[in-house]
Image (spheres, rainbow, N blue to C red):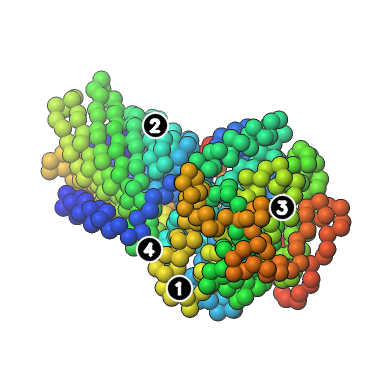
Amino acid sequence: MRPLLLALAASLVTVSAASAQWVTRDERRAPRGEWNWALPRELPALYREFNGIDFGHAHLAQALLGAQDSSSVETARLQVLEFIFSGPEVPPDEELVAPDFARAVWEAQRAFGWAHQLHRSLYDLFASDRVEDKDAAYRQILADYLSKPEAITSHALDHHGALWGFPESRAFSKRFPKFNAQIWAYHWLQAAVYDVQVEGGASLQREQMPKVISWYHGYLANPPLDWQFMPLMREAAPAFAERFPEAAVIFDNLHMLHDNVDDVLSSPEIYTSLAAKRSAVVGILDIYLHRNHEPGERYGAYHARNGHGDGHMETGPAAGRPMGVRPPSAREVLEGTAVEPVRVTGETPSPGGGHEH
Amino acid sequence: MRRPRFDGTAAVFLAAAVALVPRAVHAIDHTNLDGGRPVRLEDAYAIAHREWTIEAGFRLDAADGRTGRGVFGADVLFGLLPNLQIGAGGAAVSGSAGPAALGRAEGGRFETLFNLNQESLTLPAIALEGAFGFSSSGGDTDTAYEVTAILTKSLGRVRFHVNGGYEVAVDPGRGEDGERGRLAVGASFAPGAPMGTRWVIVADGFAEESERTGGDGAVGGEAGLRYLWSERIVLDAGIGTATAGGRMAFAAGAGISVAF
């Protein structure tokens, strides 16, 4: 037995000496508060939608690391829809859904995970009737989020310009437009529900949320291909973005980072190896991390200059690019004034069918 | 160190023990294996920073064809720092008939696990664990110290784990100390992945030296299931068997982990 232990110790030393890809795990629990777990308790249907979205992001990353023929990627897209419409009761284990992505670029997975945790904390907060001073709790949650090294910055970045001017930019939306539109639909829901939440307590949210979820399901059935850019927080949730601008900027940055990563993974002609993909993703991630903007500024060239937090139509090689039809706000959906998405044909699972989890 | 040390025939029970003395589970990352839930194998990851976990389990032991004992255990774990967890727990025995009476499952323990890194494409995840245990029997208090190195490396969606530990036990009643090494190797995977990750299967084979010079070592195997009941609760169940000096032992157990 002792020789075995010595061999084990020697192997530890050997791998410890290998600096390549050495990264710490750094899993964190969300801040504690009376709001914890309010979302699954008060709005279980919405909670299940978010579980499906978690799967959707992870499954896409894994699919793009495999053979990128249109058939296999479309199959992955339909699997995501099957998963979402199954109403998953628990979040998926994303490391099992996308094991290659997690092992290749844990830094990105960690940043995504922590930002998604912020999403969940805020959904919990606004779903909780036990917390009266939502603004104070928001500031507490935000401060805790930003204090961690993997936090995405609350500085407004130039999404439509500098951050969409990379050689691979738009590769994912060009090669896989339906899947791209589906991803943007997730981001629309993640944004829009905030405006429902800030309007009232859990009871009102339960009353209004089905209409927003139903609209989102319409996007899943008919991906909004006429959108030319991701949904922005100030479009889908203007009230929330006005009241909580830091979180709105963080989530826009998060969603743009998703797009940037998907573009890298969709560009095998540029990033020919997994190591090259990893290097590109880690480099882009660096631009988004809050610790690279405060206290010292390393990426000032990527800041938005229009004051809106997204840099649209302002700077960079993509300046002036049209944004196409823009998504509605939650209020427009609730009031019935939102424009119906353009219909596309295709086989798409619908609510009620699907896989059991 | 799942529990205070056992000796003699009790080593068989120790070896066969299908987890009782709990360790933690992350609320969402429920494939984070923990020794004792449901098998001794654990992975190299700690629970999340700031997370508390309570684990409890019940195990039935039998050896040499006779009914043995029931063992109940519970643990509390806390993510003290990123990648560092600490824990405390204990176990108690109900019934002492048969050869199980030779074993001493009662006692308490303190432990800590530090994860050094996340598994990458080339590197395994690595962790070091330290534990201190104590147990009482016949007025004596035995103590034991153990250090364990843990490796986790995946192939596709199957995770392989190696746990290598070394224990030093002090037994004032017998006026002697004992040392022994332990090795457990196994794997875990979710058969429904990627579409379903709530069920996880885990199995291992293990070998343990006897703490007594010239004593019989034990070898055995375990298998179990983990089920993510909710985002915060994991249920588990497992079975195991072991042999030492020509004597066989069997165990079956179930438990629960609750994160908060």
Give the residue at mark 1.
Answer: A271
* Disc on the earlier residue, 3 or 1: 3
- The Cα atoms of the two marked residues, 1 and 2, are separated by 50 Å
Q: Is residue B241 visible?
A: no
Kind of residue at badge 1: Tyr
Q: Is residue B60 left or right of residue A338?
A: left
Check contact, mark 1 vs mark 2: CB within 8 A. no
- The Cα atoms of the two marked residues, 4 and 1, are separated by 17 Å
Kind of residue at badge 4: Leu
Q: Spot the residue most to the top.
A: B139
- The Cα atoms of the two marked residues, 3 and 4, are separated by 39 Å
Closer to us: mark 1 or mark 2? Answer: 1
Closer to us: mark 4 or mark 1? Answer: 1
Q: Using the image, name the chain to which the residue with label 3 belongs.
A: A
Name the residue nearer the viewer: B18 or B111: B111
Kind of residue at badge 2: Gly
* Horizontal and vertical percent position of residue A248: 65, 49
Name the residue nearer the viewer: A262 or B101: A262
Give the residue at mark 3.
Answer: A234
Q: Which mark is residue A62?
A: none
Helix, strand or loop under label 4: loop
Give the residue at mark 2.
Answer: B89
Name the residue nearer the viewer: A140 or A287: A287
Closer to us: mark 4 or mark 2? Answer: 4
- The Cα atoms of the two marked residues, 2 and 3, are separated by 50 Å
